[in-house]
Amino acid sequence: MAQDEAPRPDPDADTLMEDPAPMNDAYRKPLPGTAVDYFDTRAAIEAIRPGAYAGLPYVSRVLAEQLVRRCDPALLTDALTQIVERRRDLDFPWYPARVVCHDILGQTALVDLAGLRDAIADQGGDPAKVNPVVPTQLIVDHSLAVEYGGFDPHAFDKNRAIEDRRNEDRFHFIEWTKSAFENVDVIPAGNGIMHQINLEKMSPVIQLRDGVAFPDTCVGTDSHTPHVDALGVIAIGVGGLEAETVMLGRASMMRLPDIVGVRLTGRRKPGITATDIVLAITEFLRQSRVVGSWIEFFGEGADGLSIGDRATISNMCPEYGATAAMFHIDSQTIDYLLLTGRDAAHVRLVEAYAKHTGLWADDLRVAEYERVLEFDLSTVVRNMAGPSNPHRRLPTSALAERGIAGDLVEAKAQEREGLMPDGAVIIAAITSCTNTSNPRNVVAAGLVAKKANALDLARKPWVKTSFAPGSKVARLYLEEAGLLPELEKLGFGIVAYACTTCNGMSGALDPAIQSEIIERDLYATAVLSGNRNFDGRIHPYAKQAFLASPPLVVAYAIAGTMRFDIENDVLGVAEGRDIRLADLWPSDEEIDAIVAAFVKPQQFRAIYDPMFAPRSRDEASPLYNWRPQSTYIRRPPYWDTEGVGAMAAFPRTLKAMRPLAILPDNITTDHLSPSNAILPSSAAGEYLARMGLPEEDFNSYATHRGDHLTAMRATFANPQLVNEMAVVDGAVQKGSLARVEPEGKVIRMWEAIETYLDRRQPLIIIAGADYGQGSSRDWAAKGVRLAGVEAIVAEGFERIHRTNLIGMGVLPLEFQPGTTRLTLGLDGTETYDVEGERCPRATMTLVIRHADEAITRVPVNCRLDTAEEVSIYEAGGVLQRFAADFLACETATV
């Protein structure tokens, strides 16, 4: 770039609030070849240890940069020393540049802030001063259910109309936030998925503010926020409570993460999709125990992956348990930014900055990692995942030996009798940003549909098919390529630009199909191109779900049953010959030719330029006018001293706690707070009926999380829950059940919670390993706190859920190795105390008082990991802490 050729500002910069003035101006220098400045992190690191910068991983370099630019000068040397020496015993601040939210957690975070404004006003403060400080972008993408499948030509309009009707209260509140809060941008419903829009438009890769260039970073209220890590952008998923902390201007305190290098070698075989690769990598990394680690992919294998391929891999980051899944900036990044219509001058700035500061891939060839794993892309075969877990890889060649595929004779006989077969695929969905942000995957699905149509193959009539891309751009390139009509003919018309089935919003089944499933107790399944397939997530009547690439989803819609050996069984007969999957599968050359010819920068500009055009901001009252009959938006109870819920009215004592549940390993946030459709027989369904909602408008659990009276009733409402206390006739019963003590009566979970709330009985939860894995779901923590749970003792916690618990004032405690609920023989008749000083990683004592009056004292690890977390916990939670600090500051300035 010529010296006089100043890059134009990022097109989104006018919507962003400028950072505070830099604190370490000695390191602020002109960026060669541009008219902007940067902070010389290399010089700052070299001042501590000459030569150290060359060995630092990418993540360390970016974290160090934001310290040089933002950290208090008095603390800078110590903070950088931690990075240089790879120490993990002290905290340092992280200042993400942005917060991105989907509407469920973004809305609930803003509901919390609206409630906080009320609390501030009640105590004499100025509510208008409570605003996000960090730029916050909210995308409405989690609210649409696929009530009309892709075989209905008007499905998109019908589904959107239902979404607007059901969510009128929510959308009214979200519209208010656009005007009432400063520094909040909203992308309304019907425009795409948060992560895909972040990848294709929102992230500039290199930020430019106040004349200073620096790496883009963000936190997002969804565990799949690392999707944009594919661009070299540190983006991690956090809970809404942690996002609120960042929004309100507090640094996110962290310790240097465990950074694992993953060298990718080889090249994929012909016919292998990015989905096949990521499912193999997910299994590999789960087995390699990278939970909580920050991954950096590198090597010649990584060099050959497109950004679409990389994004598929980064998106699945939480499925292999990592926190981040980084790729380095290189020519693929530059090509993608140009392909997606980014400003050419800004793209030149990205390249100039990355090459000068050592963030370009070539400069990281000698980076040193404490652990390096190696994965050979050439070993990948065609894969699925399932049932039940996204890291449970299922090679399509092994369907029969794994007991998934079976003899089709009986299935075909049932079909001839007009019945659904065993293992019927009742949902086949091309969905999720995981795969639809990758044009190769989408085009491959279109080509399979085209070949199937040419051979007169069709979906089975019981399969509810849908196509919900994460971006409107997909429609444009599929239309130009002539593939959208092919997908529509097979039943995969576009039903939405939203998360849909991947988020459990698969909509209602045909009543006749649902009745047959119930009456025959049929083993019904779902196949989707999403990222999660936990039991009970996709649909209440799909007993299990399988993840697959978009072209495989199309094939299973034709097969109609999971008992089908998708590689070998006959999909149909055409022109006197048997048609199998190989006859439909497109070549790489076919896919690549269409992508090269029909995916164009002007398509991205046509979609995103109007979406992100500057808008005028209307005046609005700083206080929201709560609607008392709403079941979607209600003033939160976190500052109330009376009423429903155990917060201020129930001070934490950590004494005489009774267990609400004793739980096995792998309890997910879907168990703790499900997101899918609300059944009329559930506690939430009964409540909504009393509130006057018709059953067809119950919507999903997720959409009601702005109303604590509905959301509390979702706590442990998953029908697949296994509470080991729910024993009837000597057997543990599956379902939303609890046992009230000391009576020993097994009842529905919500009734047990109500009983304990009436008694003001403090509660505890005992659990196994990997407690809280899954989506970053605030209500998995809010629900248990409002139920009166004061502590959770588990063998291990998922990272985001642990921070959410702390943000709600729930104490996370971890059994020490060798100790479990099983070794202790816990049955739920006990009461529990917690003793000891609450400080980072301290050893505390769990005092167990058994029914026979015996006492067991068990050492447990306090999982308040930082001083900041201790401070938040002691205040009662994130919001209580902020309110106290805000009012103290207001008083000090009077």
Image: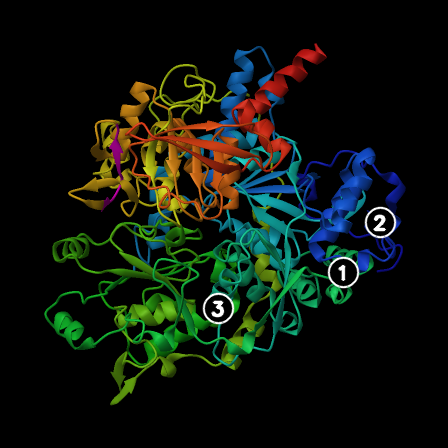
Q: Earlier in the sequence, mark 2 or mark 1?
A: 2
Label 1: which secondary element: helix
Residue closer to the observer: 108 or 788: 788
Q: Earlier in the sequence, mark 1 or mark 3?
A: 3
Picture coordinates of residue 317, whole percent (x, y): 53, 56
Picture coordinates of residue 136, whole percent (x, y): 60, 38
Label 2: which secondary element: loop
Tell me how far mark 1 sits from mark 3, CA to CA.
32 Å
In this figure, which residue is indicated by the disc labeled 2?
Answer: 40
Q: Residues within 10 Å of mark 1 (few under 14, many from 20)?
A: many
Judge left or right: residue 821 versus residue 876.
Answer: left
Does 738 appear in magenta? yes
Tag shown at residue 859: none
Judge left or right: residue 5 versus residue 165.
Answer: right
Tell me how far mark 2 sits from mark 1, CA to CA.
16 Å
Q: Residue at x 39, y 14 (%)?
A: 642
Residue closer to the observer: 364 or 235: 364
Badge 1 amino acid: Glu
Tell me how far mark 3 sits from mark 2, CA to CA.
39 Å
In this figure, which residue is indicated by the disc labeled 1?
Answer: 351
Above-or-below relation of 434 to 694: below
Instruction: Give the residues in magenta.
Output: 733-741
Camera-nearest label, 2 or 1: 2
